[in-house]
Each structure stands twice: as structure tokens, then as C-alpha cells.
Amino acid sequence: MTLRAMIDGVPGRTILHVDLDAFFAAVEQRDRPELRGRPVIVGGGPNDRGVVSTASYEARRFGVHSAMPLRTAGRLCPDGVFLPVDGRKYQAASRQVMAILRRFTPAVEQVSIDEAFLDVTGSEALFGDGPAIARRIKSAIQDETGLTASVGVATSKLVAKVASDLRKPDGLVVVEPGGEPGFLAPLSISRLWGVGEQTGRILGELGVRTIGELASIPAEVLVRRLGRHGAELRERALGIDREPVSGGEPAKSVSHEHTFDVDTADQEEIERTLLALSEGVSSRLRTAGIRAGTVGVKVRDATFRTVTRQRTLAEPTDLTEPIWRTALELARPETRGIRVRLLGVAATNLVDREQLGLFPEEDPRRRRAVQAADELRRRFGERAVTRARLLRRPLPEPFERDPRSAVEGRRGVRGVGQAAETGEKERATAGSDGRGSPVEGVDEPPAGEAPEPVDGDESEPEPERDPEP
């Protein structure tokens, strides 16, 4: 089969990848004109324990990048403007951009808070060809949100994604049909989906540094070294990717995590934090109209040793108390005699309320009290009703960086009888084999300083996926 015939397996597609530039920092600079032209670093303070969520292009000139420890960023850019993550503001901007994209096609696959794939094959009669649509989208985003986006136009998601990364910020790269192999050939293999640290090392042993060099190796050689993955990589190196633009999978979990400012062995502090996390998880379950059949906890100690435990409940719930009690029972044995750095609570095995006819309803008075408190929070803010025990332990409000794991407003959650998931989000890290944009590597900490995890905790936000061009 010829290369053209293989690519023509999905004939005539026009795929766009739209990626907002330095999104979190750009939103801050848009809303605060005095920050324009200055190095802006979002994620926390220069002495905090978290990581950089995103850095403006001005800050990147100092060597600051996503996933870098904030303390390292502070040393590299002491005059930078360090800001906390404002999830509510970024979500609002993201929703505005996604609404713009859906004007041009219903086939929009949002893959993170700041990027999406579009299949505009059926939109060309209305809006013009792919490059024309891309220009209209960029103009609409700029005019209506004050933000810039880089766009790649190609016949596949893979090539469109690579293209959008090449000329940031505010770039537009078009790869004509049939030009995919030549476009990819000179680029580093690190830009190819599926090439992580281990695969890159094996390819390096074969003398492969560029995508073109990978494409020139016989498939049987790659299969011998990498198994079936080798054949898939060679297809990608030739620009072959038949994956459709889709809406993503149903939500599978709700989880909240918190990293302590100072590692703690105080059991009261640990229990109070688990209560706050359970409260947040249960609130989101009720907002989404679902309940959880399984509760899990995550405990990380001062040495970065991490354990997870989970338990299936006697009946699904969306209430704080049963989630908290279960989390306490799971966490207590794991927190004795150690200093805890991070705690997490996850709810999995999700089920719609409509599927719960076989389960008895809990105390109706408790349900009415919970509903009344939820209504007050909706009207007057999350802090309008707070448990007395939590007055001393407010936690940052979480927000969904990855819409594929969001439950609010989603349909098709998994039934109670189905297998529980681990509650972990997929997170892109340097050299990841996942389909997200690669996150730049974390600098080695100086001697005597503990390494900072790239973990997406509530106080260590998942870095915005916007790599250097």
C-alpha cells in the first residue's frame, strides 16, 4: 500500500489544533495592563514549594518554564511577578474560547483547559478552507477575549498538534495534504507522540535523532526493538494518524489533593484536611448529580514515598460524612509516625442518581440540610457555609485543568457495578508517552534542597501545557 493510500484511509480531512499562548499568564496580563511586557510567573510565590504552572514569554527569556520549582524560578527571575493560580478566572476564559470554536464546527475535542482539536471538514462550504477558518478563529479569539492562540492545520490530529507548537506565540502553520512526511522529517523525535524517555533512549541507540531518520528505518527493525509500538511509531513518523476528533470519555473520578506548606505529623491537622477534601469531593458529586461507590486516599510523606488505598462502600453516596469516615479509616494506618507532605481524597465508581433505585434513601432530614447548604453556597459563594472545624483550615478551591476528568455537567458516568478506577488524572510530564503537549523538565534542585514533585496537587497546580517553540 502506498503512503498516499494509507493517509487517504481518512480522505479529505481538515483538522485544526488550537492552542492558547501562555494561557494563565496571558489572562493575568490581559486583566492587569501594568503586567504587560513584564515577566509573569503563575503558580505561587518565589519561596513556595509548588511548581510553575505557566510563565509568560518575557519570563521564559530568563529560563523559567512550566513544571520548574517555584524556588528555582525565583532565583532565575528575581524581578518576576509571581501570582497564584486563579482557577475561576481561567475557566471562564477557557469556556469563552471553546464557545468561539464551536461556532465553526460541532466537532470540537477539548484536550485541556487551553487547547482543542477541531474537525472542520464539513465547515468549508460555510467558512472557507482550513487556513481561512484558522485565521477567522484566531481573529475572533483576539477580538473577543484579548488572548492569542497558535493554530496548526493538517490532515490529522498528530500533524496539526506538531504544527501548532512550531511558531508560538500567535502562530499559524499549515501542512498541505501529502506534505506530512517532509514537514515532520527535520524535527526532533521528542515531538512525536509515543516517544518518551525510554523509547527515546532505544531510538538513540539506533542512531535516530529526527523524525525523518525514524521514518527511514524498516518497520521490522523497529518491531524487533519496540514491539508493536515500533510499527505505530513509524506510521506516525510518516504523518499517518487516523484518530478522529471526538468528545472524550465519560468522567471516571472526582479527586482533590492538598500539599501542606510544612510537612506535618499533627493528626488533628491531618483529619481536618481530610474533612476539607471530602467536603470538596462530595460537593462536586452533588453538583454533577452523581454518587460514588468507592473512596480512595493518597498519602505522600516527607521523603516523597506515596501510598494509595481505596474501599468500596456499602452503598453509593454523595455526602461528606461517609466519604470522610472512610478516608479517615484508610489514611490513619498510613499516617502514623510519619510527617505528611500531601493528602488526597478520591471518589470513583460513579453512578447517576437515576440508577440508584435498588439502594435505600438516607435520612431525608439530612438530605434537606445538605441541599439547603448547597443552595446558600451557590448564591453567596463557597465560604458562605463552612463547618466549624474547617474555619481554621480553608483549602484552595480546585478547578479542572483537564475537561476529560470533570464531572460537572457530564453524562455517561460509570455504573456502580463496573470496575473502579484509580482516581488519578493523566498528567503530561517531560518525555511522556501521552498525547498531551510535553511539559518541560524540572531543573535539578540545588544540593541540600528536596526535589519538587510535578504532581498537579491543589497547591502545586498541574503545569499549563504550553511548551517552548
Image (cartoon, rainbow, N blue to C red):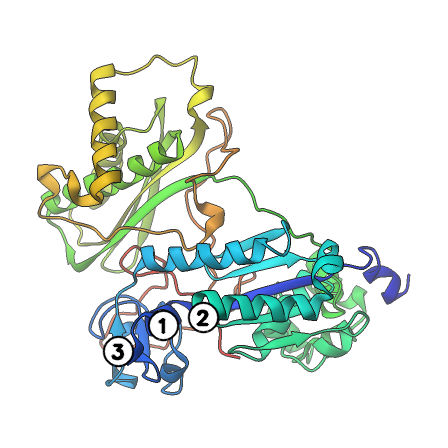
User: For the residues carrying marks 2 and 3, which lies nearer the camera in this image?
Assistant: 2
Q: Nearer the viewer, residue 391 or 6?
A: 391
Question: Mark 2 is on which residue type?
Answer: Leu
Q: Earlier in the sequence, mark 1 or mark 2?
A: 1
| Circle 2 residue | 147
Tell me where residue 48 sits by quadrant.
bottom left
Q: Residue at x 56, y 70 (%)?
A: 138
Where disc 3 sits, the SS reads: strand
Q: Residue at x 29, y 55 (%)?
A: 458
Looking at the image, residue 438 sits to the left or right of residue 339; the answer is right
Q: Residues within 10 Å of mark 1 (few under 14, many from 20)?
A: some
Question: Mark 1 is on which residue type?
Answer: Arg
Split into 4 quadrants, where in the image is the N terminus?
A: bottom right
Q: Measuring from the top left, give residue 47's x and y in whole percent.
A: 20, 73
Q: Residues within 10 Å of mark 2 (few under 14, many from 20)?
A: many
Q: Nearer the viewer, residue 238 or 169?
A: 169
| Circle 1 residue | 30
